[in-house]
Structure formats: C-alpha cells, structure tokens
Image: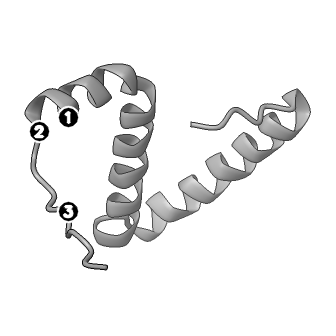
Amino acid sequence: MASKERKATYSPEADKKWKDANRERRNYLSGRGAARSFIRNKATLEDLDELIRLIEERKESIADNNLTKEF
C-alpha cells in the first residue's frame, strides 16, 4: 500500500485566523521570549539581582492567590 506524502503549504489566511484567535497566547510567548533574550544577552549583574527579587515576589503572589492560569 503506497502512502501519500502530505506537503506542508503556507496559508496566510490560517496564520491570521490563529493569530486573531490566540492573541493572548501570542503576547505571552512574545514577552517570554523577550525576557529570555534580555537575560541571556544584555542583563547586567544589577539587572539579574533585581530580576531575582521580582521573580521571588511574583512566585509568592501566585502562590498566595492560587493563580495558575495557563497561556
């Protein structure tokens, strides 16, 4: 039995539909990527110290408010 290979094609309409339907997810991923890039490439020691403090505060806030929203 011969299998037919399916070729991927770019569909601008499908891309726009996904972007419109997943705006919050797209913004989340964009912000996460920007944060990682900043930490890896540009952050100074002072920046990293501040980020560690902010991360600890955020973790406490999430734990206290039981915020477990998935993006």
Q: Residue at x 29, y 70 (%)?
A: 41
| Nearest the eye: 40 or 48 | 40
Q: Where residue 35 is drawn, which disc sits there?
A: none
| Nearest the eye: 15 or 25 | 15
Instruction: Determine the residue located farthest toward the top in the rendered image.
Output: 20
How far is disc 3 from disc 1 in space, using C-alphas? 19 Å
Look at discs 3 and 1 and give the one toward the viewer.
3
Earlier residue among tags 2 and 3: 3
Residue that label 3 marks: 6
Q: Please identify the quarter of the rendering in which residue 15 is found.
A: top left
| Nearest the eye: 50 or 34 | 34
Q: Amino acid at mark 3?
A: Arg
Residue that label 1 marks: 15
Q: Amino acid at mark 2?
A: Ser
Look at discs 2 and 1 and give the one toward the viewer.
2
Residue that label 2 marks: 11
Q: Please identify the quarter of the rendering in which residue 40 is found.
A: bottom left
- Residue 32 in the image: above or below residue 45: above
Left-right relation of 24 to 58:
left
Instruction: Determine the residue located farthest toward the bottom in the rendered image.
Output: 1
Residue neighbourhood size for the residue with mark 2, other residues' Cα within 10 Å, grouped as few (<14), some (14–19), many (≥20): few
Left-right relation of 64 to 7:
right
Where does residue 66 sit, x and y in percent of width and height? 87, 32
Where does residue 22 sit, x and y in percent of width and height? 40, 27
Q: Amino acid at mark 1?
A: Asp
| Nearest the eye: 43 or 66 | 66
Q: Is label 2 in contact with label 1 (beta carbons under 8 Å)?
A: yes
Residue neighbourhood size for the residue with mark 3, other residues' Cα within 10 Å, grouped as few (<14), some (14–19), many (≥20): few
Q: Is label 3 in contact with label 1 (beta carbons under 8 Å)?
A: no
How far is disc 2 from disc 1 in space, using C-alphas? 6 Å
Q: Secondary structure at mark 1?
A: helix
> In what quadrant of the picture does the N terminus appear?
bottom left
